[in-house]
Image (spheres, rainbow, N blue to C red):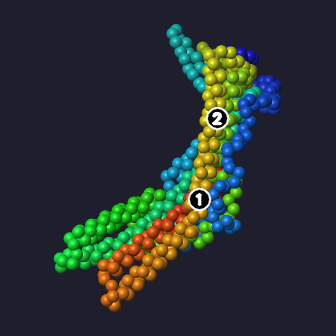
């Protein structure tokens, strides 16, 4: 039900003067309404506890004391890592989508805030009409209309709070996309270099097995070995050739992935990659000092979830405010000119009045909307807790991987070194005629396998550092403005 009270007065005069005293009274009434104190229904938002642990259960690497992970990719001895990450940040559809969502959210905030202020419109019209018998009429009208809903119960302010929270969430989502993109580029580049190194080892392995196959087949033909030995040597060489082809496919896929992530032309990328083929990027000082629990608040995905929770809380107030009366003020001033049967009349007019909307019966629709808003808040709260738990898990898992990375790499390096020494000794014996070529090739393959295992362990170690970087938010802080965002 809507109750409205309006006063309308039309004043016709030849000189088209407005009743200035009345206009002053109208403006004064609007100004008085601007300072009306009003309450805001619904809960006032406070960040809830999310169940983070008191201490990390996994040990910190190096028990450490130094270094931040901001711009960690610049610490590699391979400058191409930083180049590829920066290229991906300049030209990536995911980041462009995130920036577009920021602009949408900023516009949504402008719409929400506009409801807190009066609206003013100018309308002008001119019509002519006629009929039988001879009849003609012309009417011209110009009007300034003003309207303002007084935010008695804070519904519009809650809508503005929700829009502001969603804008912050959109900004944080851009940082989340950037952190994930940087880690993905680094992992693909690291994977490509490891693949190239394994491919080189596989080529050496294949050459060794083919040499063994030829020697074994000669021995079979001479009657010094059983036919099964020749078949085994052939199968071993074929199996290695199959693995070599699979590695070639993996390397090509890694290059295609980098092309898609960076937006670089493939010939240009291949040219950049050629200089350090098969060399894994080595970190200069990827060392984590202390890792306080507050690092979880520096994860942009947690910030996104928390801002979504704040918006859901504000929307409860918006839904609750719809259950209460709404008071609006309307006003208009204008002038009109009317010509009828050769007679002309000019005049000014004004109108002003409040409108009160009292919800009486809606079959429970507004109450159901409020219940739905509370349920959406509960859903957002559960999502926020889930993101925090996932963050804790990812940090703990990264710390576990790093806790043994140094020892594993040291053992793998020792194994590769010792097998290389065994191969060198076998090569020296073969050179002086004290060993067989088959023995030499067997030790060569053991050395190649140990070197490939060392490459794999080294890859795992660097990937664990990248995983920790990603798990703690990549050095992001909430005051960083997205590059290319409006207002940045």
- Helix, strand or loop at mark 2: helix
Q: Mark 1 near mark 2, Cβ–Cβ under 8 Å? A: no
Which residue is rendered at x = 39% and y = 60% of the image? Answer: 253
In what quadrant of the picture does the C terminus appear?
bottom right
Label 1 belongs to which residue? 400
Question: Closest to the observer: 378 or 110?
Answer: 378
Label 1 and label 2: CA atoms lie apart by 35 Å
Q: Secondary structure at mark 1?
A: helix
Instruction: Name the foreground residue: 165 vs 145.
Output: 165
Q: Earlier in the sequence, mark 1 or mark 2?
A: 2
In this view, the residue in front, 470 or 35, is 470
Viewed as shown, does residue 45 lie left or right of 369?
right
Residue drawn at x 53%, y 48% is 97
How many numbered dots are placed on residues in this image? 2
Q: Which quadrant would residue 74 be assigned to in this image?
A: bottom right
Against 194, residue 304 (above or below) is: above
Residue 150 drawn above or below residue 87: above
Can residue 200 be seen by looking at this rendering?
no
Residue pictured at 65% horizontal, 27% vertical: 370
Crowd class of label 1 (few under 14; some 14 to 19; many from 20; radius 10 Å): some
Residue at 69% in and 54% down: 55
| Residue 470 percent coordinates (x, y) | 58, 57
Q: Is residue 67 left or right of residue 38?
A: left
Q: Return the mark for residue 377.
A: 2
The N terminus sits in image quarter: top right
Percent position (x, y) of residue 280?
49, 70
């Amino acid at each position: 039900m809507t109750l409205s009270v309006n006063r309308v007065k039309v004043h016709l005069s030849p000189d088209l003067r407005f009743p200035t005293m009345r206009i002053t009274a109208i403006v004064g009434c609007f100004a008085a309404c601007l300072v009306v104190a009003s309450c805001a229904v619904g809960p006032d938002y406070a960040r809830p506890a999310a169940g983070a642990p008191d201490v990390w259960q996994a040990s910190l690497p190096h028990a450490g004391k130094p270094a931040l992970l901001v711009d960690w990719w610049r610490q590699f001895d391979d400058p191409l890592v930083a180049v590829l990450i920066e290229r991906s940040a300049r030209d990536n559809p995911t980041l462009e989508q995130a920036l577009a969502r920021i602009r949408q959210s900023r516009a949504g905030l402008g719409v929400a805030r506009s409801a807190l202020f009066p609206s003013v419109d100018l309308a002008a019209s001119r019509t002519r009409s006629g009929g039988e018998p001879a009849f003609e009429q012309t009417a011209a009208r110009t009007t300034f209309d003003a309207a303002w809903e007084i935010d008695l119960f804070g519904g519009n302010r809650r809508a503005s709070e929700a829009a502001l929270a969603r804008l912050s969430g959109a900004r944080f989502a851009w940082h989340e996309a950037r952190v994930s993109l940087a880690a993905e580029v680094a992992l693909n580049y690291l994977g490509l270099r490891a693949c190239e190194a394994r491919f080189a080892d596989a080529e050496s392995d294949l050459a060794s097995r083919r040499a063994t196959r030829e020697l074994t087949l000669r021995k079979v033909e001479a009657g010094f070995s059983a036919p099964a030995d020749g078949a085994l040597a052939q199968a071993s060489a074929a199996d290695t050739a199959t693995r070599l082809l699979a590695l070639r496919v993996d390397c090509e896929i890694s290059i295609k992935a980098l092309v898609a992530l960076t937006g670089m032309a493939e010939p240009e990328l291949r040219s950049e990659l050629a200089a350090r083929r098969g060399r894994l990027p080595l970190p200069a000082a990827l060392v984590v000092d202390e890792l306080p629990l507050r690092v979880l608040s520096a994860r942009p995905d947690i910030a996104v979830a928390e801002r979504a929770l704040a918006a859901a809380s504000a929307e409860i107030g918006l839904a609750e405010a719809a259950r209460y009366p709404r008071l609006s003020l309307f006003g208009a001033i204008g002038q009109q000119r009317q010509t009828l049967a050769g007679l002309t009349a000019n005049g000014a007019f004004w109108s002003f009045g409040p409108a009160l909307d009292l919800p009486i019966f809606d079959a429970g629709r507004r109450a159901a909307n409020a219940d739905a808003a509370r349920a959406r808040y509960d859903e957002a709260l559960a999502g926020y807790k889930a993101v925090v738990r996932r963050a804790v898990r990812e940090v703990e898992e990264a710390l576990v991987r790093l806790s043994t990375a140094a020892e594993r790499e040291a053992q793998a390096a020792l194994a590769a070194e010792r097998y290389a020494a065994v191969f060198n000794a076998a090569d020296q014996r073969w050179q002086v005629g004290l060993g067989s070529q088959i023995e030499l090739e067997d030790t060569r393959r053991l050395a190649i396998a140990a070197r490939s295992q060392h490459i794999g362990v080294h890859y795992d170690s660097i990937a664990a550092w990248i995983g920790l970087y990603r798990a703690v938010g990549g050095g992001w802080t909430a005051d960083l403005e997205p590059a290319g965002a409006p207002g940045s």
